[in-house]
Amino acid sequence: MIPQFFQCRIATMLASPLSPSSAELVLGILNQVLMEGSPLDRAYSRHFSGLKLESEEQARIATVTGELIRRLNLFCFLADTTPERIEREGSRVLNAWHRFHGLPIPRLRYTLDIEEAVFAERLERAKAEPLLWDGCPDWLDKLGQAELGDTWAAERAALSLAPKRYLRTNGLKCTRDELATRLAAEGVQTVPVDGVESALEVTSNAALFRTKAFADGWFEQQDAGSQLVAAALDVKPGMRVIDACAGAGGKTLHLAAAMTGKGRLLAMDVEQWKLDNLKERARRAGAHNVETRLIAGSKTIKRLKLSADRLLLDVPCSGLGVLKRNPDAKWRDTEERLPVLMELQAHILGSYSRMVKVGGILVYATCSIMPCENRGQVDAFLAANPNFRLLEDENITPATSGFDGFYLAKLERIAE
Ligand SMILES: C[S@@+](CC[C@H](N)C(=O)[O-])C[C@H]1O[C@@H](n2cnc3c(N)ncnc32)[C@H](O)[C@@H]1O
């Protein structure tokens, strides 16, 4: 399983340097992500499997690795190297990270250090250059500027921060207050999140997934911004609801809770393993009205023509709203994949929208903050489909909300 990420303030978490073995693990994970192009989750799984690491130590490793990847340019600059040289000079970058946080340097067998005076001089230069300070690659900065103009700098800075940890209360099992009380009894401190009624923010360093509350299906870990997406569908018990890009079911389970288990909830995806994962999670959550269906081709969609009161299209996207949590997207092939993803988004919106009944509502959502994947797609769809109208849309941005970034648009089918 992927480690539990402790999104507490880095300084309070790391009062001491990484141990040599943990430092080696960080370097191994960095190499796998930056040199082999592997997703960060997979690199964690590979490096942690078979090790008997305390969950707190896994969290320390994830905290350091996450910040190094989020602000890679900065730490490479401070270490007088470049991301391309990380394989050979990674230890210097890790040492720069420790100096940056005022921590002693880990005692590795083989290490490259940077002189204190050089580090101090570079640190002052970096503070004067916001782009460098945020550790943002050039391609992303150009895209952000072009897409978001004056608001980009604040988003770029917000995306360089460590993510917080949020839970979604499973309303099928408990209320938010009951969950908070039970978690407190298990040593997990939380605070309610204003404006997101299902969400709690975790404020202590606890091994969440080892709690009895988790085993009993009382919560899922889910960003607070993400919890606003399912809420926008305004589902009611008894409705016929389709989640057509359900993945492993983060939002499906939220919809099931809002339906209080009544009505039909069809979760679809093109990947069977994700639906299998969803079924397992639905069992734990007590979500008995969820049915899964693999999308094997266009026929699967055609058969459901005009059948849904509510349709969620949480489409595949660049993930450029969730870089705090998945910072590896900054350094992988995201720029090259963007046009391909946009074509897929347009296809899914155009083709899957036929599943909504007249008077029914479709929510189009992404975890991107770039208008080309968001309002741009919705406007193009509406121009070609006058039988739908836009009710409202919302940009949930890291800079304005402190959450991960999401977009959602609510569309109503007004004619066949
Ligand atoms: C953003 S993720 C969904 C996340 C999920 N809704 C959640 O809350 O956990 C997008 C999903 O779309 C799926 N997908 C990709 N192409 C698709 C297609 N043509 N039709 C339906 N789903 C697709 C992916 O497998 C992925 O699970």
Image: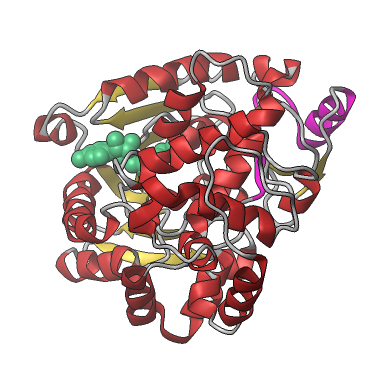
Image height of 125 relative to 408, above or below: below
Image height of 320 relative to 109, above or below: below
Q: Which residues are magenta?
A: 164-185
Q: Quadrant of residue 398?
A: bottom right
Q: Position of residue 246 (x, y in %)?
A: 37, 34
Instruction: Using the rendered image of the protein, determine whether residue 306 is visible from the camera's viewpoint.
Output: no
Q: Could you tell me how many numbered marks the image carries?
A: 0
Left or right of residue 94, residue 279 in this image: left
Left or right of residue 73, residue 269 in this image: left
The reply to whether the magenta stretch includes residue 99 is no
The reply to whether the magenta stretch includes residue 167 is yes
Q: Quadrant of residue 119?
A: bottom right
Instruction: Using the rendered image of the protein, determine whether residue 392 is visible from the camera's viewpoint.
Output: yes
Task: State the residue in front, 19 or 288.
Answer: 19
Residue occupying the point 71% across, 29% down:
56
Residue occupying the point 66% across, 53% down:
98
Left or right of residue 22, residue 191 in this image: right
Q: Position of residue 81 (x, y in %)?
A: 43, 63
Image height of 362 relative to 183, above or below: below
Q: Position of residue 163 (x, y in %)?
A: 61, 51
Residue occupying the point 28% across, 31% down:
269
Q: Which quadrant of the figure shows ligand 1?
A: top left
